[in-house]
Image (cartoon, helix red, strand yellow):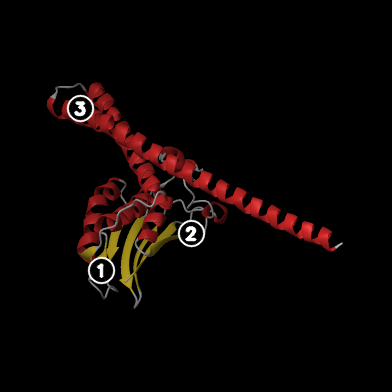
Amino acid sequence: MDDENERSFYASITSMIALQLDRIRLINKTMAASKAKSAFISNMSHELRTPLNAIIGSAQFLIAYEELSDAQQDSVGSIESSAEYLLNMINEILDIAKIEAGKMEVYKEKINILETLNNCYYMLQPLADEKGLDFELNSQNLTIFEIQTDPKIFQQITINLLSNAIKFTKEGFVKLTIYNDKKYLYIEIEDSGIGISKLDMLELFNDFTQVKNVMRKQHKGTGLGLSLSQKLAHILDGDVELFSAGLGYGCRATFSLYI
């Protein structure tokens, strides 16, 4: 009886070890597949960016230096905007691949908060003016003026959130508010746009997710903007959150950054 129990015990141990080895092999295969996917995306993105930049450059040359009819200018303009759309999509996918592969490089330096955010504001002001939106920047409650962060990533997140707000606001306002407490800097972007339902809110930070509604059909995208912004914020020890009272009630996006 003792021998039988002993054999059963060792059989159980052997089975447990076999299961653990299978698990380790599965994890290694998954990691290898993930690395291969990231490498493929990175290589393909690089190969696609070169011809797209050539297309954009050629289209811009034709518009600037060739005598084109109105119809021809419209056609070449469509080529340029389509190529730029594809290039932006590829850049977003490449950034996601870099983050997943742990290869997103961060270079922190001291930046002037107001100067950096003013640059973002004035860069996007023409888009807001074109739609007749009330575009406001408020920094009354900002008590710190410099922060140590990566300026490129910091601006990328802010521009992503601002352009989203302008894109999905047909009329009314987009308001950029900057303030801080003892621990965090807050960049808050509020709009009077289409809003988001509570059900859709749960999905918005997933990769390649877009909420289906009338205005989003007019503004197609990769569905990576919010997901990418949040991932980039995490790299900077921050976060991106989105709030909405529902469809038709606008949105408030908050980019918080640890001071």
Disc 2 to disc 1: CB gap under 8 Å:
no
What residue sits 69% from the left and 54% below the top?
14
Identify the residue position indicated by label 2 in the image. 244
Q: Amino acid at mark 3?
A: Ser
The kind of residue tagged 2 is: Ser
Query: Would residue 32 be found to the left or right of residue 128 on screen?
Result: right
State the residue at coordinates (32%, 65%): 177
**Which x, y percent locates residue 195?**
47, 53
Kindly report the distance in space between the C-alpha atoms of the residues bearing marks 3 and 1. Answer: 40 Å
Residue on which disc 3 sits: 58
Pick the residue in front: 84 or 139: 84
Circle 2 packing at 10 Å, graded few (<14), some (14-19), many (20+), is some
Disc 2 is placed on an element classified as loop
Mark before the other along the chain sequence, 3 or 1? 3
Judge from the rendering whether residue 159 lies leftward or rightward of residue 222; answer left or right: left
Q: Can residue 18 be seen by looking at this rendering?
A: yes
Q: Which residue is mark 1?
A: 147
Residue 193 pos. (x, y %)? 42, 52
Identity of the residue drawn at 33% across and 55% down: 157
The location of residue 228, given as percent across then percent down, is 40, 51
Looking at the image, do the residues carrying marks 3 and 1 touch, with CB atoms under 8 Å apart?
no
Chain-order first, disc 2 or disc 3:
3
